[in-house]
Amino acid sequence: MQNKVLILDFGSQYTQLIARRVRELSIFCEIHPFHNIPVNVSTFKAVILSGSPFSVRSEDAPHPDLSAIRNKIPLLGVCYGAQYLAHFNGGEVAPSNTREYGRARLTKVEKHLFLKDIPLQSQVWMSHSDTIKKLPKNAMQLASTQDVANAAYVMDDDMSFGIQFHPEVYHSSDGKQLLQNFLVSIAGITPDWTSDAFVDTTIDRLKEQLGDDKVILGLSGGVDSSVAAILLHKAIGANLHCIFVNNGLLRKNEFSDVLVQYEHMGLNVKGVDATMAFLSQLEGVSDPETKRKIIGRVFVEVFDEEANKVEGAKWLAQGTIYPDVIESISVNGPSATIKSHHNVGGLPDFMKLNVVEPLNMLFKDEVRRVGASLKMSPAILGRHPFPGPGLAIRILGDITQEKVTMLQEADAIFIQGLRDHDLYDDVWQAGVMLLPVQSVGVMGDERTYEKCVALRAVTSTDGMTADWVHLPYEFLQEISNQIINRVPGINRVVYDISSKPPATIEWE
């Protein structure tokens, strides 16, 4: 693949947004930490330097060797990237006289291919405390705002560009146009990366990589593992052996319902009910990270036992997607990591299998588009994401069968309600949290002292950021009544109106 872009991550919270905007232009891109630049950069037709929480003036500022890129490959520095190019090439970067955060408008736009179709007064998004006071001698100013003289510039005979605003943020109204100008008009990249093209190239690659080998895939019922399964099925057919483990923490009837779905897809699937193995190990455990580790460990033990029954298996397939990879890589890189991803990049030593991850360069919405190209059922592709540890991280505190059953019933009412009111597809992810809280209630002539649950519904593109959904009050009232009346042990329902960040989508 030659039509691709390298994004060097300096730790910006917006780095993944850059990748997403590039992908929206039908151009493939990869994110790499600034200190781990690919050895062969000639496979990339353009490079983008991200923003950063660092200042180029600080002693610990990221300072990678760009000699293999500068003047050889079209280069775009964004925010810190622009300041980096200026500072280390004879320009001057200094603290801003005023805070430069939020919306601004371009008051000067020079005629240049880089700024084609970018009008005066175009809104841009600033987020920096330093500013470029003086450009390098070989640089030319291209755009300004009222407060930022060098909002955009070009140097290296039209090979290197810098912008002090963020085109990847939606608040930059012409950001997509600017990225298109740089990548298509200047770098000469052909925007031909589509879901259909991905399907064709991936199936061919899997055929070559796997040959006649047997592959084991752990299915979860979710979009990622299901799309991975169909890609592998088209590549190797009956040599794909799928295992669907019931950890006892799935949604109501999910184990049986999903197995039926997979049978209709023509997949070779074995269902394994390991409810007791998981619940017995989780007994008395309240710490969220400990619960995750126990579930991960028991899953590997159950899965390994079943995998050993597939004679001659050489590969383990996983539905890992790109945000998982980025977050895991960043553990040793510049960006902060919220939680570890045990399913990325490897297996315990005792599982002597090679790993194949056909989706590990895709974002969630891209996975759905690939599934549509494969003619998969909209019911599967539109399914809300569901956490790997299942309801264990939606039960705050220790896990018991009683609590699991209670939560399954409440969750089923909420999800079915969303479907019945045509709200399901307007929500990216929804679920119910069982809180370690009891409160006084009144039912008839009796006082109760029972559990409280929280409803959670968010909108998102890929789960990296999310906002709470403004569900109708009448709907929330109906769901609250149904849960309290139908689920013994619950007498109070609340609605979570927190966004991510600062909260997370799940509660644990």
Image (cartoon, rainbow, N blue to C red):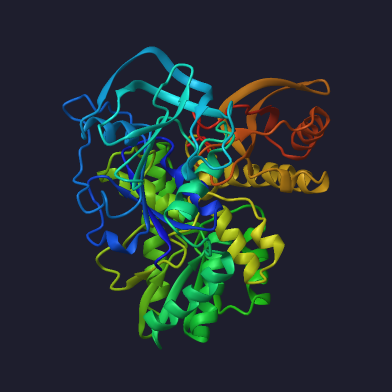
Residue nearest the observer in this picture, 420 or 38? 38
User: Residue shown at 82%/20% (left/top)?
Assistant: 445
User: Residue shown at 55%/75% (left/top)?
Assistant: 269
508 relative position to 437: left or right: left
The residue lying furthest to the bottom in this view is: 212
Q: Position of residue 148 (x, y in %)?
A: 42, 21
Q: Can you say which quadrant of the picture contains the N terminus?
A: bottom left
Residue nearest the observer in this picture, 282 or 461? 461
413 relative position to 118: left or right: right
Tell me if residue 134 comes above or below residue 139 in the rendering: above
Q: Position of residue 64 (x, y in %)?
A: 20, 43
439 relative position to 416: left or right: left
Tell me if residue 232 comes above or below residue 48 in the rendering: below
User: Residue shown at 18%/46% (left/top)?
Assistant: 65
Tell me if residue 305 comes above or below residue 457 in the rendering: below
Residue 228 seen anywhere in this rendered image of the structure: yes
The image quadrant that residue 460 belongs to is top right
The image quadrant that residue 81 belongs to is top left
Q: Position of residue 69 (x, y in %)?
A: 26, 52
Residue 341 seen anywhere in this rendered image of the structure: no
Q: Position of residue 3 (x, y in %)?
A: 43, 63
User: Residue shown at 50%/74% (left/top)?
Assistant: 242
Residue nearest the observer in this picture, 223 or 414? 223
Q: How many marks?
A: 0
489 relative position to 131: left or right: right
The residue lying furthest to the top in this view is: 97
Residue nearest the observer in this picture, 249 or 60? 60
The residue lying furthest to the front in this view is: 111
